[in-house]
Amino acid sequence: MICNILNVLGTLYGLIIGFATIRLLKKHVAELYNQYTAIEYKKLQWAKTYIVLGLCYVTLGIALKLLFPLIIQNHYYQFVMTIINIGLLYWVSIHGFFQQNIIWLLTDKSKVLTTKQKKPTTVEPELEEDLRSINMLLKELEAFMIQEKGYTKTDLTIIDAAERLGIHPKQLSKIINSKYNQNFNTYINTHRVKKVIEVLESDSLKNLSIEGIAIEVGFQSKSAFYGFFKKYTGTTPLKYKKSLKNIKK
């Protein structure tokens, strides 16, 4: 009786941990878009897949135990379950070994500009000063993107951009989100796509393919470029290029 209760509690605990981990992974992915431009190998998709498979595995075990209690005592069943356990363990170990380390941004209150300070005796001047500071930062950010072409750095992170501006990454993330209603990833990739469109329209890099131009402006992979280009323009790069040729005719 006690063993059955412990088994049930252990199973419930495993299910709760599994679903909680999936929620954390979703938050992790959302944070990635606020920090990185190259996210292909940082999404921990393998971990999510492993947890989902694990939840299915546990659910199947519960169902078999309830519907066919005699099967779980079968040696063949136990052998198959052992092989599955070893396979899952080996699979997650391999993916974990090759997983890149991801820097987690910590809030440094000493470096964060915010309008939510202690209430001063006169509020308006301080608010105006904060707004001026933010506008200056935005101008510096745009200068870094357009004049210095900061977006062409393939592995550009919000830490790099924040260091260039001399502010904390979290503050830069908040400014981009509030001003442009975009995360850092979208903001940088928008600059990249605009440059690709500019190059295609001017036909200034005839010797490069569309993929070559994408790499030149900072996209790390073909899939990332095509995905964002279609999201931004509503069409594929090839169709966009063909439409330009038709217009010129």
Image (tube, rainbow, N blue to C red):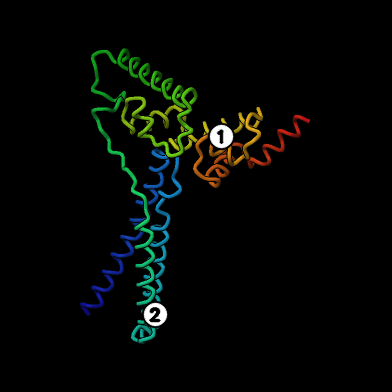
Circle 2 crowding by C-alpha within 10 Å: few under 14, some 14–19, many from 20: few
- Between the residue at mark 1 and the residue at mark 2, the CA separation in whole angstroms equals 50 Å
Residue at the image point whose x is 28% and y is 64% from the top: 13
Q: Amino acid at mark 1?
A: Val
Name the image quarter holding the N terminus: bottom left
In the shown orientation, is residue 113 left or right of residue 196?
A: left
Depth order, front residue of 123/140: 140
Name the image quarter holding the C terminus: top right
Q: Secondary structure at mark 1?
A: helix
In this rendering, the answer to whether 75 lies above or below 19 is below
Residue at the image point whose x is 28% and y is 72% from the top: 8
In the shown orientation, is residue 148 left or right of residue 243?
A: left
Q: Which residue is mark 2?
A: 80
Q: Amino acid at mark 2?
A: Val
**Occupied quadrant, residue 166:** top left
Q: Secondary structure at mark 2?
A: helix
Circle 1 crowding by C-alpha within 10 Å: few under 14, some 14–19, many from 20: many
Q: Contact, CB < 8 Å: mark 1 with mark 2?
A: no
Residue at the image point whose x is 34% and y is 63% from the top: 93
**Occupied quadrant, residue 239:** top right
Point out residue 92 in the picture as x, y percentages from the top left corner: 36, 63
